[in-house]
Image (cartoon, helix red, strand yellow):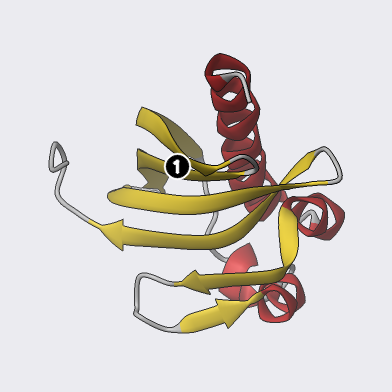
Amino acid sequence: MHAAAAEIALRTAETALLKAQQRGDRDAMAALLAADFEEIGSSGRHYDRASILAAIGSAKIGSAQLEDFEISDFRLRQLAKDLVLVHFRTRLRRGDSVLHSARSSLWRREDGLWRMAFHQGTPCAQGVA
């Protein structure tokens, strides 16, 4: 795996997931989430692929009104040939609020396509690594 190509592909995929959530695009989300996807939300609650896809268009995701976001400090660590751990930070603006998070995702290449197998986002103060 070429590190630069993987970084571009995975940064693009992380951005697409944030945009898909904003639009409520179930197909876009489904294409990027592995069948065995799991997430630990900022509340500590566990989600699987089915619950994430079912929530699209509901108040849980639709009410977020994500106006803009910024990804920074993006880095990846190859764990195996087709398995990459990604760490990054986000700044999300929702109305008058700005939310900062430290995020980690586990991406697995399946049939030549990257799919997210795990994700966790932890709220944090601005500038905290």
| Residue position marked by numbered label 1 in the rendering | 86
Question: Is residue 68 rendered to the left or right of residue 114?
Answer: left
Q: Is residue 38 above or below residue 123?
A: below
Return the x and y of residue 120 as percentages of the image width and height.
42, 62
Quarter-of-image position of residue 63: bottom right
Q: In this view, does 120 lie above or below 59?
A: above
Q: Nearer the viewer, residue 72 or 24?
A: 72
Count of marks placed on residues: 1
Q: Is residue 100 above or below residue 63?
A: above
Return the x and y of residue 55 as percentages of the image width and height.
69, 76
For the residue marked with disc 1, what is the amino acid? Val
Question: Who's the residue at 63% across and 26% down the image?
Answer: 1
Question: Who's the residue at 80% across and 40% down the image?
Answer: 113
Return the x and y of residue 18 as percentages of the image width and height.
58, 46
Return the x and y of residue 73 as percentages of the image width and height.
31, 29
Question: Is residue 22 rendered to the left or right of residue 105?
Answer: right
Q: Is residue 105 above or below residue 1?
A: below
Q: Is mark 1 on a helix, strand or loop?
A: strand
Question: Is residue 123 rendered to the left or right of residue 47?
Answer: left
Quarter-of-image position of residue 6: top right
Question: Who's the residue at 86% across and 55% down the image?
Answer: 27
Position of the C terminus, as image quadrant, is top left
Question: Who's the residue at 14% across and 49% down the image?
Answer: 125
Question: Seen from this angle, which residue lies furthest front?
Answer: 81
Local crowd at mark 1 within 10 Å, few (<14), some, or many (≥20)?
A: many
